[in-house]
Image (cartoon, rainbow, N blue to C red):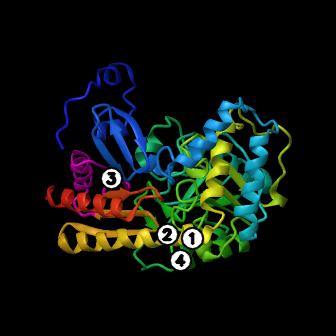
Amino acid sequence: MTITQPDLSVFETLESEVRSYCRGWPTVFDRAQGSRMYDEDGHAYLDFFAGAGSLNYGHNNPVLKRALIDYLSRDGVTHGLDMSTTAKRSFLQTFQDLVLRPRDLPYKVMFPGPTGTNAVESALKLARKVKGREAIVSFTNAFHGMSLGSLAVTGNAFKRAGAGIPLVHGTPMPFDNYFDGTVPDFLWFERLLEDQGSGLNKPAAVIVETVQGEGGINVARPEWLRALKELCERQDMLLIVDDIQMGCGRTGAFFSFEEAGITPDIVTVSKSISGYGLPMSLCLFKPELDVWEPGEHNGTFRGNNPAFVTATAALETYWTDGSAMEKQTRSRGEQVEQALISITEENLADVSEYRGRGLVWGLEFREKERASRVARRAFELGLLIETSGPEGEVVKLLPALTVTPDELDEGLSVLARAVRETV
């Protein structure tokens, strides 16, 4: 692909140095459809990042776009605080009928604000209010958001340092396989809980990702998650599952914890819940935990009604028959896995490991900086991928769930070439 030098001057002179994704993809994007993005010069890029998991159904999905255009054309409410609206009612009813009831999940639904970190903050606040305790346990290499409460339960040292103040009331514990199987699960955690001299304050809750996306695509085993749920029940702690990136079908089932057969006390959902990349998040919790006073937690943009419209359309389109969607995602995931096996076998000296579930996969390199070089070369070849892990050592694949088998083959071939050409 021949790429002319784009005009990035206004971004480089006016926009803050905090910008990040644009540094790895130095072009100016203009439009997008399905699994492809196009820059202002018309060059096409296959998108295996999907808005960091916010576009599970692809860019400008035509069914969702039609629902949104129709709603706006009739002057439907766009901003509604937490007022009752027809758009919110349709979403709540559809979410209950297609997601909660078929899974026998009893959750109440809270709209805490439009972003994932809003949902996490509300979950932490609720857990502390219910239990009357301050401490929250999180896990090594966790990522839960960039606001202060979420950062306190995030593992990445670089992101934590940006807070500028001590991050308190959070205690990290080892994630699944942190000690490569040499230490029994939760041995350290439970010993601290039971030892009156450990110095560990009794936690209100434990927050966990079933697959750590930003942490390096670390996949928790179902038995580990079940043991964690049992530990929380024994020790009178709430279990919060952060499903912001891995929910909405990313791992196969609608919720990523379904495979483990557990029912968390609290679940946070965001990113692809709107289906269209519009800001929206949910905090779900068991009815007995609904101890909020009216207005005790609020926010101006909880009522993003256009997001309710596209979320409803997404559920009706893809989750009326959830088993079909889950089967398709798992099939696409097997296609990715086979390609990663081939790449690994071809580069045994360089690839440390591949891992994933559904349509979230990671390829870890022994030379940590190589992942960034692979992502950079992939961009030059027309593929958008990112890195993750504590030192950016993992190439992260997050294609849309609607990606076609041919698009997957195309992108995975580009990835294999990028690996070969960055030795």
Q: Residue 3, image x and y in percent?
A: 20, 36
Mark 4 closeness class: few <14, some 14–19, many ≥20 residues within 10 Å:
some
Q: Secondary structure at mark 2?
A: helix
Along the horizontal axis of the image, is 367 left or right of 321? left
Mark 2 closeness class: few <14, some 14–19, many ≥20 residues within 10 Å:
some
Location of mark 3 (residue): 392
Quarter of the image where the C terminus is located: bottom left
Q: Amino acid at mark 2?
A: Gln
Label 2 close to label 3 by CB (< 8 Å): no
Closer to us: 333 or 216: 333
185 w.r.t. 49: above or below: below
Q: Residue 278, image x and y in percent?
A: 57, 40
Label 3 close to label 1 by CB (< 8 Å): no
Along the horizontal axis of the image, is 398 left or right of 232? left
**Label of residue 185 in the image:** 4
Location of mark 1 (residue): 324
Q: How far is disc 3 from disc 1 in space, using C-alphas?
A: 34 Å
Residue positioned 58% across, 68% down in the render: 253
Looking at marks 4 and 1 on the same chain, the residue that comes earlier in the sequence is marked by 4
190 w.r.t. 362: above or below: below
Q: How far is disc 1 from disc 2 in space, using C-alphas?
A: 6 Å
Closer to us: 141 or 333: 333
Location of mark 2 (residue): 328
Residue segment shown in magenta: 365-393
Label 3 close to label 4 by CB (< 8 Å): no
Looking at marks 2 and 3 on the same chain, the residue that comes earlier in the sequence is marked by 2
Q: Secondary structure at mark 4?
A: loop
Quarter of the image where the N terminus is located: top left
Mark 3 or mark 4, whichever is nearer to me: 3
Q: How far is disc 4 from disc 2 in space, using C-alphas?
A: 33 Å
